[in-house]
Amino acid sequence: MISSTRRSTLASFIVCLALAATVGRSHPASADDWGQWMGPNRDGVYREEGIIEVIPSDGLPVRWRTPIHGGYAGPSVAEGRVYVYDYLIEDGRPFNEPGQRANLRGKERIVALDASDGSEIWSHAYDCPYNISYPAGPRCTPTVDGDRVYILGSEGDLLCLKTDDGEVLWKKSLKRDLSAEPPMWGFSAHPLIDGDLLYTMVGGDGQGVVAFDKMTGDIRWKSLDCKAGYCPPSIIQHGGVRQLIVFHPEAVVSLDPANGNEYWSIPINPRFEMSICRPMIDGNLLYASGLGNESVMMELNSQKPAAKELWRGTPKSSVYGATATPLFVDGVLYGSDCHVGQLYAVDAKDGRRIWGTFDATRPEETRRINHGTAFVTRIGNSDRYLIMNEMGDLVLARLTREKYESLGRFHVLEPTGEAHGRDVVWSHPAYAGKTAYIRNDKEIVAVSLANE
């Protein structure tokens, strides 16, 4: 185990004061922070004023670049610090083969950087041999809650550390402590903090999802006989109660967050157990999708915790998300389709594809590409969206029911991963302090989004 180090300066202290906020129900997040996967509310909305209206032809200002190691985990940003989770390979040959696990020896590491200049404040690493497919590094974005940051590694190492200096407060191994089997592509359910509990997918008899005490790591409850899959749990308020939504490889399930008791369940079976994208809510509708033309639109009961199926997708309808969760806005789904590779707008009433474009994923393409990926983030309540595509381009676009309109693009970094014979970036950005924080397997880049 590598000891933690700390660097503190007056400048970083001032930044921390300016950006002070936390995530989690007990500590409401500031609009300037992005302390977990898909933002403060995990809804893919960036709520900050003074953001660019267009990306100029000469690009955007780069504030800093900092070298890092491999991983799919997106960065998180809170209280003037950027948290990055990566993997340092020490031995073995990494390769990407969907049905085959690679054996590597190395360390998983979380590093805290100063958001103002990208310099390291502290880091913590631990030995972690890999036996997974696509072994670039961790999948889960660090989750910041007050003075603690939580990480879940590809092999099931769950840690709670102090944000101040990286001291480990508690740790669990899903493999050793719960006898869980790591999924083919590694544990991927970004830890969810709500109140005094941490939720994540574990997998196994009676422990598909587990709630831990966020302060101690003690298990508070376990629920469901299912495999872990790759989708993080989420919480919605509907039918007069708060519901924990779990998408595992065989169903979308609603549970009581307090005890894990089941409210309702609707079956859906993505191929290769690839339940990945968070089910997204819009009004009384909830949408889930996965590989293999598997998707289902559900209607939530407004009077009680219950749901019914409205429609299922067909090969030429709906949008099938994989690595990137579609957004659901005013009756329209916007997301990149893992079978065709286009960004689609889909009518929530019946799954009809309203329009599609490769401009947001790979503009030079004209035919189908497997898992063509774009991470879509809405800017406030506007019709403007930030789109980070797999080529390393940050795109600003206007998305409406009627059309896709590009408002410029900037090539931020090189695609360093490989998938289906092409180079890709498959990591969700973070947006905070009028800045986009974007990573690949070699560096993290801070790009100004200020409308100046």
Image (cartoon, rainbow, N blue to C red):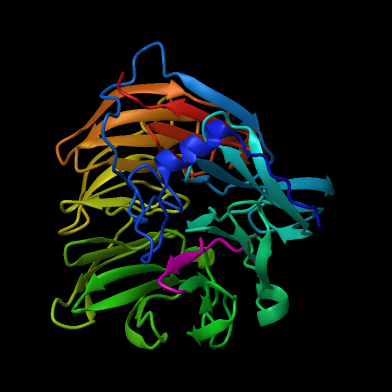
User: Residue 143: x, y in percent?
Assistant: 51, 57
Q: Main secondary structure of the magenta part?
A: loop
Q: Residue at x 36, y 81 (%)?
A: 255
Dividing the picture into quarters, in which one does residue 364 lie?
A: top left
Query: Vertical placement of 139 versus 449: above or below?
Result: below
Q: Residue at x 30, y 22 (%)?
A: 451
Query: Looking at the image, which is closer to me, 162 or 324?
Result: 162
The answer to whether one can see residue 270 in this image is no
Query: Looking at the image, which is closer to me, 115 or 445?
Result: 115
The number of numbered badges drawn on the structure is: 0
Query: Vertical placement of 392 versus 195: above or below?
Result: above
User: Residue 14: x, y in percent?
Assistant: 48, 35
The answer to whether one can see residue 259 in this image is yes
User: Residue 195: x, y in percent?
Assistant: 40, 72
Specify start and end residues of the magenta stretch as a single range.
185-196
Query: Vertical placement of 76 versus 12: above or below?
Result: below
Furthest residue in direction front, as rendered: 10
**Is residue 317 shown left or right of residue 373?**
left
